[in-house]
């Protein structure tokens, strides 16, 4: 039987008190529960590279002190007076977005992730490195029974980040998809692209990852340090998703696209991206970007993951050792996602 509703008067977590600072214990009063909010008792929270950027204030949008974390899985502890889609005790997840205006063009089209007034779970508010967190019920997503909580947590940001472009660019069993980078995002992109029936190619500078990439769903592996290997796949792909935060010879990847193909960025290179326009014009090719997905897409993505056995490869840490976990993520010493456990 679900437990009785309990609303926290104090939420305890780990907060950054200054840019780049170590996380320290922090308590805050969340105030009354809004009519449309849900309070989640957190069991797991993934560590995303976005958390690291927010802690360091790399984007200039952090307000201190704040509790990071936006890959939350837990159970509903309490619901607002007008919440009808969730019940106390339900296992749920909360990703990067915790609210939107509900009235703009994008919200009315079911594209709440593009809402100009979108509320992020841990920007200007406290997130999931804590015992509890709150979000608008529309953005709190039930977790299918087939998914384990620890493996499901990274799907709420990393998973939807790679799933969304696959859906938006119409990937299907006739598609040829390339994934640049076999890391926290890329290892999930390989699995989803394979589940869609596409012919999947992994691009990586780490030849040691070839066997693992094939196990994750890739049909082919290309060492992106070898110019001959890149030349051999010219004109092959309908969609290439770049998951990396590193500079590349992007013209080479545009050359790897078939006519009407798309190079889509979900990772952010440190330098401006540049290339000649003629290959785009001649082949009706496109360069695009993609953010997280809407609540509808999150529901859909989790269902696909549950039915196809897609899960994040994780290393777990006690919540109290969040600083240790963050350091391992910074050093790229985690394959492939770190998850904090309460």
Image: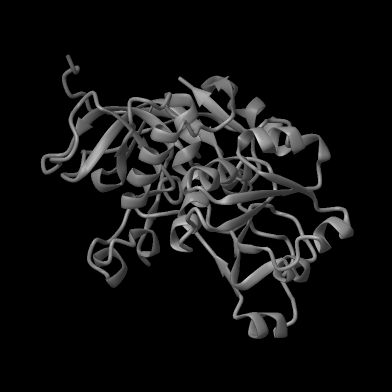
Q: Is residue 70 visible from the viewing direction of this image?
A: no
- The quarter of the picture where residue 144 lies is top left
40 to 109, vertically: above or below: above
The answer to which of 32 and 131 lies nearer the viewer is 131
Q: Position of residue 304 (x, y in %)?
A: 40, 40
Q: Residue furthest front?
A: 174
Q: Is residue 289 visible from the viewing direction of this image?
A: yes
Q: Position of residue 30 (x, y in %)?
A: 31, 37
Q: For this view, does 71 lie left or right of residue 181?
A: left
Q: For this view, does 335 lie left or right of residue 331?
A: left
Q: Position of residue 163 (x, y in %)?
A: 48, 50
The answer to which of 265 and 262 lies nearer the viewer is 262
Image quarter hosting the C terminus: top left
The answer to which of 255 and 103 lies nearer the viewer is 255
Q: Position of residue 161 (x, y in %)?
A: 50, 51
258 to 266, vertically: above or below: below
Q: Residue at left 24%, top 66%?
A: 108
Q: How is the image coloured?
A: one colour
- The quarter of the picture where residue 216 lies is top right
Q: Residue at left 36%, top 54%?
A: 294
Image quarter hosting the N terminus: top left
Q: Residue at left 31%, top 40%?
A: 141
Q: Residue at left 51%, top 47%?
A: 197
338 to 265, vertically: above or below: above
208 to 290, vertically: above or below: above
Q: Residue furthest top?
A: 1
């Amino acid at each position: 039987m679900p437990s009785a509703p309990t609303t926290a008067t104090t939420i305890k977590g780990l907060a950054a008190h200054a840019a780049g600072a170590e996380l320290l214990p922090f308590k805050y009063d969340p105030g009354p529960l809004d009519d449309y909010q849900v309070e989640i008792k957190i069991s797991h929270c993934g560590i995303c590279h976005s958390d690291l950027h927010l802690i360091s204030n790399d984007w200039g949008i952090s307000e201190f002190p704040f509790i990071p974390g936006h890959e939350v899985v837990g159970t509903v502890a309490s619901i607002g007076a007008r919440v009808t889609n969730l019940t106390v005790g339900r296992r749920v997840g909360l990703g990067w977005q915790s609210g939107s205006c509900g009235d703009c063009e994008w919200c009315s089209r079911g594209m709440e992730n593009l809402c100009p007034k979108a509320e992020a779970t841990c920007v200007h508010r406290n997130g999931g490195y804590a015992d509890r967190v709150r979000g608008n019920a529309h953005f709190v997503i039930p977790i299918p029974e087939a998914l384990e909580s620890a493996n499901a947590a990274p799907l709420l940001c990393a998973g939807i980040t790679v799933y969304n472009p696959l859906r938006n660019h119409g990937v299907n069993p006739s598609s040829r998809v390339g994934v640049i980078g076999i890391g926290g995002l890329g290892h999930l992109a390989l699995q989803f692209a394979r589940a869609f029936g596409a012919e999947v190619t992994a691009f990586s500078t780490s030849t040691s990852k070839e066997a693992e990439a094939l196990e994750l769903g890739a049909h082919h592996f290309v060492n992106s340090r070898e110019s001959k290997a890149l030349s051999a796949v010219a004109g092959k792909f309908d969609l290439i998703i770049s998951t990396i935060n590193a500079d590349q010879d992007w013209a080479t990847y545009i050359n790897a696209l078939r006519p009407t193909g798309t190079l889509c960025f979900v990772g952010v290179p440190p330098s401006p991206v540049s290339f000649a326009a003629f290959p785009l014009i001649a082949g009706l090719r496109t360069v695009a970007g993609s953010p997280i997905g809407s609540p509808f897409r999150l529901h859909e993505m989790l269902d696909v993951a549950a039915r196809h056995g897609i899960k994040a490869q994780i290393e777990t840490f006690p919540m109290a050792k969040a600083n240790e976990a963050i350091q391992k993520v910074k050093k790229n010493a985690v394959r492939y996602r770190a998850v904090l456990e309460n």
